[in-house]
Amino acid sequence: MQCLPNLYKKNWYILSFLLMISIASLFLHSYGKSQSFIALNSYHPFVLNVFFINLTFMGDGIFAICLILLLRLVYKKNQLTMALGLSFLFSGIVVQGIKNFVFAPRPRLFFEQGQYLHFLDGVSMANYASFPSGHTATVFALATVYAIYTHSKLKQLFYLWLAVLVGYSRIYLAQHFLLDVIIGAIIGTATAWLVCYIQYQYQFGNKKSRQELNITSTMLVH
């Protein structure tokens, strides 16, 4: 998966992401914080409860760490694991920094009793630190790195929509509001893109410097 040279060929991925963010932001602007949350949570069958309870773990820090260690120790994907690790680390730092400065109650504390009826049994409900969504930032950071590191547009689309589903799971499970998820997605994607850009510049900048040095040495010899 040596695809860093294709960093600048992922414009369609970013455009798809921006389109998704624009639609979500328009929806949020139209309905507001409370009504957008309720509108996105009007259907709660048992099968979706089970599905999203399990899917949301893909945004957990434990999942990210296990994935990175697996790719590094078993599959020896050095460049990929470095990009994943740094993206996960820096997106987490940004998210936690914002959480420490912004007071944002989660849905269970935000809504009055009886206003929302789909809190799920067995799902841990934190009361504070809703903004932004750390799970969403993590999964979008991982998905964006994977999208950059693959040639297949189909796989890139799969990674994007998988991240979208994980982000939506945070709303479905009443852990976050739509705004929390939107900002988390932006943080994760921007962090991953920046990490890969720096990695690209470092790798190919050094390669170019070595080539220029070899050319100069050859000219001196002749």
Image: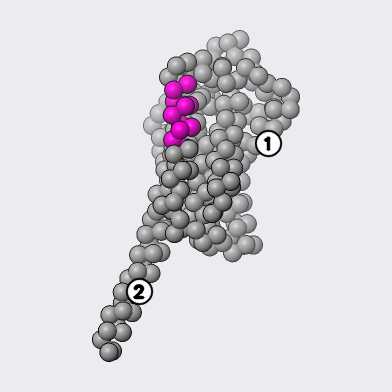
Q: Secondary structure at mark 2?
A: helix
> Which quadrant of the rendered structure holds the C terminus?
bottom left
The residue that disc 1 covers is: 54
Counting from the top left corner in percent of width and height, residue 73 is at 61, 62
The residue that disc 2 covers is: 210
Asked whether 154 or 167 is in front, the reply is: 154
In magenta stretch: residue 218: no
Quick check: 211 above or below 104? below
**Label 1 sits on what residue type?**
Asn
Is the magenta region chiefly helix, strand or loop?
A: helix
Q: Quadrant of residue 202?
A: bottom left
Label at residue 167: none
Mark earlier in primary sequence (2, 1): 1
Residue at point 71%, 22% (across, down):
45
**Label 2 sits on what residue type?**
Arg
> Which quadrant of the rendered structure holds the N terminus?
bottom right
Quick check: 153 above or below 119? below
Q: Secondary structure at mark 1?
A: helix
Residue at point 44%, 35% (across, down):
18
Q: Which residues are magenta?
A: 17-27
Asked whether 14 or 57 is in front, the reply is: 14
Q: Is residue 129 visible?
A: no
